[in-house]
Image (cartoon, rainbow, N blue to C red):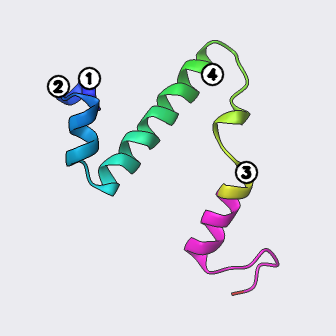
Amino acid sequence: MAEKYGMLPSEILSKATTLDMLIFNTSNIIMLREQRKSRGEDINDTYDPQELEELYFNATGKTKDGEK
């Protein structure tokens, strides 16, 4: 974000909203995954499967059993 918008990291921390930081973090993870994939490296440590499941269940309202 600092590179893209020409701001110092301290400026970003003081001016950014939670959404800005979430977008920044997500874009960095995506770039890291793409770099690792292009080098043929393992990308499994760039995400937490349990966290993804929790996000899915929270978004859909379903439980692990598939019930709402």
In the displayed structure, 68 sits above or below 40; it is: below
User: Mark 3 or mark 1, which is nearer the start of the sequence?
Assistant: 1
User: What segment carries the magenta color?
Assistant: 52-67
Q: Which mark is residue 49?
A: 3
Give the crowd class for mark 3: few <14, some 14-19, many >=20 residues within 10 Å.
few
| Residue 33 belongs to the span the image colors magenta | no
> In the image, is 21 to the left or to the right of 31?
left
| Quarter location, residue 14 | top left
Given residues 40 and 26, the one toward you in this image is 26
In the displayed structure, 27 sits above or below 20; it is: above
CB within 8 Å, label 2 to label 1: yes
Given residues 53 and 14, the one toward you in this image is 14
What quarter of the picture does the C terminus occupy? bottom right
- Which residue shows up at 22% across the image and 28% down it? 8
In the displayed structure, 61 sits above or below 34; it is: below
Q: Which mark is residue 6?
A: 2
CB within 8 Å, label 2 to label 4: no
Quick one: SS at disc 1?
A: helix
User: Which amino acid type is marked by label 1?
Assistant: Glu
> In the image, is 4 to the left or to the right of 54?
left
User: Which amino acid type is marked by label 3?
Assistant: Pro
- Which residue shows up at 74% across the image and 79% down it? 63
Q: Position of residue 64 (x, y in %)?
A: 79, 74
- Give the number of the mark in front: 1 or 3: 1
Q: Which mark is residue 3?
A: 1
- Which residue shows up at 50% across the image and 34% down it? 30
- Give the number of the mark in front: 2 or 3: 2
Residue on which the image places disc 4:
37
